[in-house]
Image: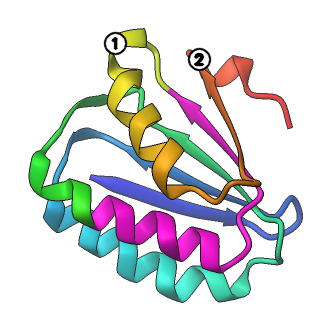
Amino acid sequence: MIETFYDEIKNIVTVVYEGNVNAVEEKQLYLKLQDLLPKCRRGFRLLVDLSPVNRVEEEAVPVIKMIMDLLNQHGLSEVIRIIPEPDKDIGFNILSIFHYGKNVKVLTCQTPEEVHW
């Protein structure tokens, strides 16, 4: 399950994952973001809570890349990821390096309490 929220005042998109990251849910997220991102101001920030994620299924990776491209096209400026276990971070770091825009700042926290904008 994936929940998505947009805080218009702070210009922050929040995506909260639960369970496994799979292609079906990622495609649904892509469609939600297609509708949501035009409402965001350029320079918007993204908070991704991956703390309840067990694993990323291989079939989801191409859709994740499409989502990253979409975020870049709409003016993403900063990403903060909540990943509680360092070993879960490896795959997400690889995807971030190659698919977020070069000017996008990517930070990783282990708990929601560590997030500071």
| Foreground residue among 80 and 35 | 80
Q: Is residue 30 left or right of residue 15?
A: left
Task: Return the disc, 2 or 1, that comes first in the chain's sequence.
Answer: 1
Q: Determine the CA span between mark 2 and mark 1.
A: 15 Å
Q: Is residue 2 visible?
A: yes
Kindly identify which residue carries mark 2: 111
**Amino acid carrying mark 1 in the image:** Asp
Q: Is residue 85 visible?
A: no
Quarter-wise, where is residue 41 in the image?
A: bottom right
Percent from the top left, x then y, of residue 80? 65, 38
Total of numbered circles in the picture? 2
Mark 2: few, some, or many residues within 10 Å (few <14, many ≥20)?
Answer: some
Q: Residue at x 47, y 23 (%)?
A: 83
Is disc 2 placed on a helix, strand or loop? loop
Quarter-wise, where is residue 89 in the image?
A: top left
- Disc 2 or disc 1, which is closer to the eye? 1
Percent from the top left, x then y, of residue 1? 26, 52
Is disc 1 placed on a helix, strand or loop? helix
**Amino acid carrying mark 2 in the image:** Thr
Quadrant assignment for the C terminus: top right
Q: Residue at x 70, y 19 (%)?
A: 113
Residue 15 in the image: above or below residue 19: below
Query: Residue 76 lies in magenta, yes or no?
Result: yes
Kindly identify which residue carries mark 1: 87
Which residues are the magenta region?
Answer: 63-82
Q: Residue furthest top?
A: 86
